[in-house]
Image (tube, grey):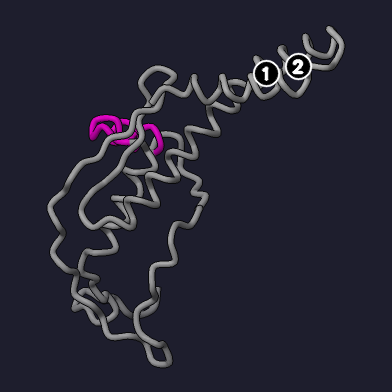
Amino acid sequence: MDLNPYLGAVAADLEKATALADDATRELTARVAVAVEPALRLAMTQLLADAAAQLTSELGTAVITVRMDGREPVLDVQEQAAPAPAPTAPAPAGSDGPAEDDGVARVTVRLPEQLKRRAEGLAQSADQSLNTWIVQAVRRAAQAPHTDHRNSSRRVTGWA
């Protein structure tokens, strides 16, 4: 997606806002526009990634990813096979049943650098953004059957 028309519109609006100003102010505004262009580009790319994540969570089997092609974000839509419904565990006592999806939540995760690099490589090989790859990994893990190890025959008890 070419962000240049949007960045150009912001620069044009700044020019219009300072049209009646003196030459020094207009020159300073032009320099500021050039200086903030990378930050605006990053903010717009983050907006696209957040929108893609929200749409992916609302769509059934389609996954929308944002990947970078040079300095420009590229949106990809991929249809995936519908996952088999995960077995549902009974709701804990006192709850009103399964929680409804509240939309998209932002979570900060601190990863060891080596794990982050490996995840980035896996995301890149899947032609996905790291965010989309992590969301899908968590989704798969959440749908996997849960094993209750407390009642497992491999439980170890005693004194150490």
Residue beneath disc 2: 29
Q: Is residue 105 left or right of residue 27?
A: left
Which amino acid type is marked by label 2?
Answer: Thr
Say which residue label 1 marks: 33
Judging depth in this view, the residue of 159 and 38 nearest the camera is 38
Helix, strand or loop for disc 1: helix
User: In the rendered structure, which amino acid carries the disc numbered 1?
Assistant: Ala
- Label of residue 46 in the image: none
**What residue is at 29 percent from the left and 57 percent from the top?**
139
The residue at 24%/71% (across/down) is: 146
Relative height, residue 113 to residue 14 (above, below): below
Q: In which quarter of the image is residue 60?
A: bottom left
Location of the N terminus by quadrant is top left
Toward the bottom, the furthest residue is: 94
- Please name the predominant secondary structure of the magenta segment in the image: helix
Q: Give the range drawn in magenta.
A: 116-128
Query: Going by the image, does 60 lie left or right of 49?
Result: left
Using the image as rendered, state which of residue 16 and residue 53 is in the foreground.
16
Position of residue 79 relative to residue 141, above or below, is: above
Q: How far apart are marks 2 and 1 (CA)?
A: 6 Å
Q: What element carries label 2?
A: helix
Q: Position of residue 145 (x, y in %)?
A: 20, 69
Local packing at callout 2 (Cα closer than 10 Å; few below 14, some 14-19, many 20+) is some
Q: Quadrant of the C terminus?
A: bottom left
Instruction: Residue 126: give x, y in percent of width and height.
Output: 23, 35
Residue 28 figure quarter: top right
Where is residue 74, by image quadrant? Answer: top left
- 80 vs 1: above or below: below
Percent x, y of residue 40: 58, 28
Of residue 35 and residue 17, the one placed in the foreground of this image is 17
Residue at x 49%, y 21% (from the top left corner): 5
